[in-house]
Amino acid sequence: MSYHNPFTPPRKSATFDDHTLAEIRRAAATGIYDIRGAGTKRKVPHFDDLLFLGASISRYPLEGYREKCDTTVTLGTRFAKKPITLRTPITIAGMSFGALSGNAKEALGRGATIAGTSTTTGDGGMTDEERGHSQTLVYQYLPSRYGMNPKDLRRADAIEVVVGQGAKPGGGGMLLGQKISDRVANMRNLPKGIDQRSACRHPDWTGPDDLEIKILELREITDWEKPIYIKVGGARPYYDTALAVKAGADVVVLDGMQGGTAATQDVFIENVGMPTLACIRPAVQALQDLGMHRKVQLIVSGGIRSGADVAKALALGADAVAIGTAALVALGDNDPHWEEEYQKLGTTAGAYDDWHEGKDPAGITTQDPELAARLDPVAAGRRLANYLKVMTLEAQTIARACGKNHLHNLEPEDLVALTMEAAAMAQVPLAGTNWFPGKGSF
């Protein structure tokens, strides 16, 4: 005879939790895997697990109202004739026209220009609105080659060769048919309304030696003017960074698994790649071992949300960061203002990640003309500029508190970790000790 203890509530499995059970039932009912956008939703060690050590007797702080703390960064100083200088080290990551509406792309350009930073095209080519409203525009060169042409390479201020993305290192892109409008189809040379899947690797090279040749081709096309970035997903950051440098990159962009995507398999987003925090120090070590730290610039992306995150990434050795999801939120994505419509889609503001369906009530991740018209690119651009300004000021505030007169003067010595995992990944001491895993004895 079974007996249920009335004083103990039913106990659910930690392994087979409600989400896991729902996914099993969905897979069994449909026979297809789940596709979604955004980044990982699982909790991984992140910048919240680090703290700064402000100045006291052993260090002296800088006075915010009188003493300067520089935030400028120059990218592409290694080989490019025309490196780019930004007023803030916070850049806008690549997000395509197709994944985003035309108004959203224009807003990103407007906001980045006001803030004195760069934005990036993403897959599918360059729109005239984006080029017209972006003072500094990085052109992404992806395996798909959608929309790629030499004219736009020359119109750009820098070129980013995308080898991998943090949400799906080793995987290609997706843009489902409902977002392939007439204009998107024309730019990508695709049939309207048909699902588009980008290749997971470049069609004309297979390794670092071929990448060197490709970089030289791009330099010749652009008369050696444009900085050449290489973007990799966070998987093997030491070797990928070293090989990118040896192939001739001016800048390495390193994207951790908290980085978002327009659409890919959920199993990819949650189970492939490494946390951003785990990627930075190996990449920096590779640059240092090659004598190229600060000579080849490192841009870190994937889950950057605040000025504190920016300061921590720079303290660990990055030169700049890139934001994607946070920039969309600043524009108005997942805004509770549209909660009633999110509810009709079966979700809620803050959880909406079905960007591939093209039904975004905020008018950002859609090609529906009526929905896209809801986003005022001028007002949204101002919101983004405000957000970038606040992030920059927050990073400055922390730097001054640590006695630094430039954000790049922040260093690992200014940080401690709250958890063993973060201490090991960031290679900074566990708070209250001078030790981190792998260093040796306390």
Image (spheres, rainbow, N blue to C red):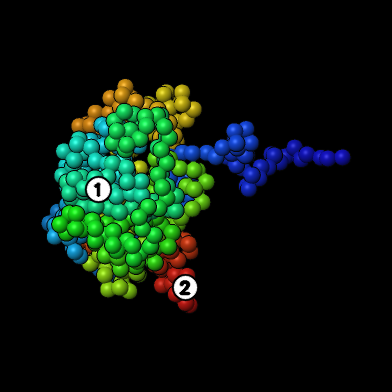
The numbered mark at residue 428 is: none
Pointer 2 or 1: first along the chain: 1
Label 1, secondary structure: give it. strand
**Rendering coords of residue 243 (x, y %):** 35, 66
Count of numbered circles in the view: 2
Q: Measured from the top left, where is residue 383 in percent x and y?
A: 24, 36
- Classify 10 Å Cα crowding around label 2: few (below 14), some (14-19), many (20 and above): few
User: Which residue carries the number 1 mark?
Assistant: 139
* For discs 2 and 1, the disc positioned in front in the rendered view: 1
Which residue does the image show at 41% across and 32% down from the upper left? 194
Please say if 333 is above or below 392.
Answer: above
Q: Which mark is residue 438?
A: 2
In this view, the residue in front, 190 or 406, is 190
From the viewer's perspective, is 6 left or right of 403?
right
Asked which secondary structure carries label 2, the reply is: loop
Relative to 223, does residue 358 appear above or below in the rendering?
above
Quadrant in which the N terminus appears: top right
Does 263 sit above or below residue 54?
above
Q: Seen in the image, is 235 located left or right of residue 28?
A: left
Q: Can residue 64 be seen in this view?
A: no
Q: Seen from this angle, which residue lies furthest front?
A: 204
Q: Residue 202: horizontal and vertical position, in percent?
A: 37, 53
Tell me which residue sits at (60%, 36%) in the image: 31
Residue at position x 31%, y 22% in the image = 370
* Amino acid residing under circle 1: Tyr
Residue situated in front as seen by the camera: 70 or 55: 70
Q: Mark 2 and mark 1: span between their CA atoms?
A: 40 Å
Q: In which quarter of the image is residue 89?
A: bottom left
